[in-house]
Amino acid sequence: MNNCTVVNILRQRSSGILLPIFSLPGPHGIGDLGHAALRFIDFLKAAGQSCWQILPLGPTSPLFGNSPYMSPSAFAGSPLLINPDLLVEQGLVRRREILPPDCSEYSVDYHLVARHKAGILALAWQRFQLRSDWPDILETFAATHPWCLDYALFVALKQRHQGKPWYGWPEEIRHRRPTALAAARRAMREQVDAVVFEQYLFFGQWQHLRDHARRQGIRLIGDLPIYVALDSADAWANQDIFQLDRETGLPTDVAGVPPDYFSATGQRWGNPLYRWTTGDDLIRDRLWDWWEQRLRLNFMLTDTLRIDHFRGFAAYWAVPAEEETALNGRWLPGPGQPFFEEMDRRLGGMSIIAEDLGLITPDVATLRDTLGYPGMKVLLFAFDGDPRNSYLPYNTEKNSVVYTGTHDNDTAVGWFLNPDVTRESKRRAKRFANRSDDHAGSFHQELIHLALASPANLAILPMQDVLGFGNDCRLNTPGVLAGNWQWRCAERFVNKDVAAWLSDLTTLFGRVPPESDCQTGATQDP
């Protein structure tokens, strides 16, 4: 691995683009870790950008609308993101065996892609087993990634039990009796090894991408959901660190947020909660060790992490599992400052962005500021007419990350065309950009000017806003299960003209960093 470091994007003026891996162009129906990803890194460099922000990389499920925030593993990579062309180059499949199906260059058909990639991975697995050293390769990989064997067994057991959640499996497997687990591993060794092989491929391709990003001086920003899915390898393999009923495996309390301006009954997410406040030192140590492993892996994959729902580390909303809404929840204390200080000590430093949107109480702001983590400033939230609005450009702190919008927002142009947004808010947004017209077509450029000109050290621009795309290119609508996480950026839009325009703006607003250490050979603290 290339050991050079690049500039600290959180401590000096810089900018980057938000684009999920699945949104990349490419012939196989979904963005993946192949050559298109490397070309996008080259585009970022040509555009004067310092970083690429992505969404979580884990496997997704159609039961949850293929949301990257509801994965069956907090550690595994999605096999849908494995690139077939690189498998051809490795000699694991033949070119004629990876001919892509007829699919859209603008959206992901997850069912079609899953079938396409599954066939290719099955062929690659057959060929891989022709190597005499394949067991040693997978054994070495699993030793480096100890979570992988539990995850692989979880996937195999899900298949054996027709997709039932783990808490519906036979008692001896649900409770992870050692003899039952050993018997399952023996009976399903082929299936378990095949899943480990997929993870071996994913992490190998990711390392190739990461090395290229380092050579080009591009930092990668990952995204870490605070909670895991109930039906996940993490909850099944670590039941004692979650608030679960010991007999049934079902949650006693679940995650959510209390009632607010947007919802009179709050949001009941349903994720299991961590046992942060247990009086058992052994369980506390296991919980912190699990988080250390999770953070360590994510910092192996990326340079900086955006921690989703950061406020849950100060205090979290616990909803009794039997409640249908989040109305009757209660606040419970999170692990707070000692947790982050200990993780920082164990990992030798962490580069973190705190997702501090929504209901932020003084204790959350104090935790964020004491730790020195930058928070998020979303410009689309700024134009309500309150001069104290913290998202307004002139109220933005230097130690923050400004976004035109996030994966949960409409695009800039979509927001301006939305009839539910008041005319006053649109007029106010235009005035901040020194415009008096009511044209939506240029609004993305005006919002990008405001973001890049702001005091925030880091500015992040969703690719849809860079290109001026509308509501049909939105990534996610919270609270709506269907139709999300599908948008893809066609290859022709990632071009030299866009790169030149963005590079000029980035230079104008002083966000082009000095030459990276990867090019000069110097070293610099991250």
Image: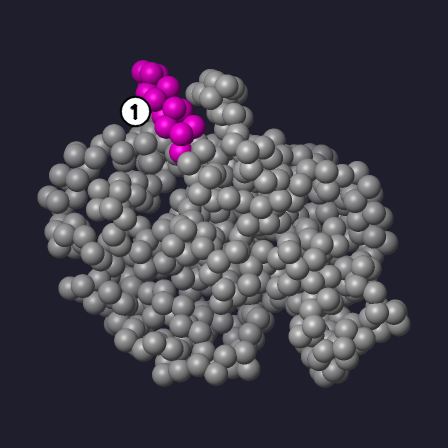
**Is 186 positioned to the left or the right of 421 in the image?**
left
Quarter of the image that includes the N terminus? top right
Q: Please indicate, yes or no, whether residue 146 appears anywhere in the rendered image.
A: no
Q: Please indicate, yes or no, whether residue 26 appears anywhere in the rendered image.
A: yes
* Label 1 Cα neighbours within 10 Å, binned few <14 / some 14-19 / many ≥20: some
Image position, residue 489 (x, y; %): 65, 44
In the rendered image, residue 424 lying in the magenta stretch gets the answer: no
Q: Hey, what amino acid is under mark 1?
A: Pro
> How many circles with numbers are drawn on the protein?
1
Q: Quadrant of residue 143?
A: top left
Q: Nearer the viewer, residue 501 or 347?
A: 501
Residue 97 vertical position relative to residue 473 in the rendered view, above or below: above
Q: Residue at x 37, y 19 (%)?
A: 127
Residue 31 vertical position relative to residue 508 in the rendered view, above or below: above
Q: Quadrant of residue 286?
A: bottom left
Label 1 belongs to which residue?
135
Q: Nearer the viewer, residue 481 or 345?
A: 481
Q: Residue at x 21, y 35 (%)?
A: 188
Magenta-drawn segment: 118-135
**Is 240 positioned to the left or the right of 504 in the image?**
left
Q: Nearer the viewer, residue 216 or 522?
A: 216
Q: Quadrant of residue 119?
A: top left
Identify the main secondary structure in magenta.
Answer: helix
In the rendered image, residue 124 lying in the magenta stretch gets the answer: yes
Which SS class for mark 1? Answer: helix
Q: Residue at x 55, y 63 (%)?
A: 477
**Is 93 positioned to the left or the right of 41 in the image?**
left
- Colour scheme in the image? one colour
Image position, residue 387 (x, y; %): 75, 82
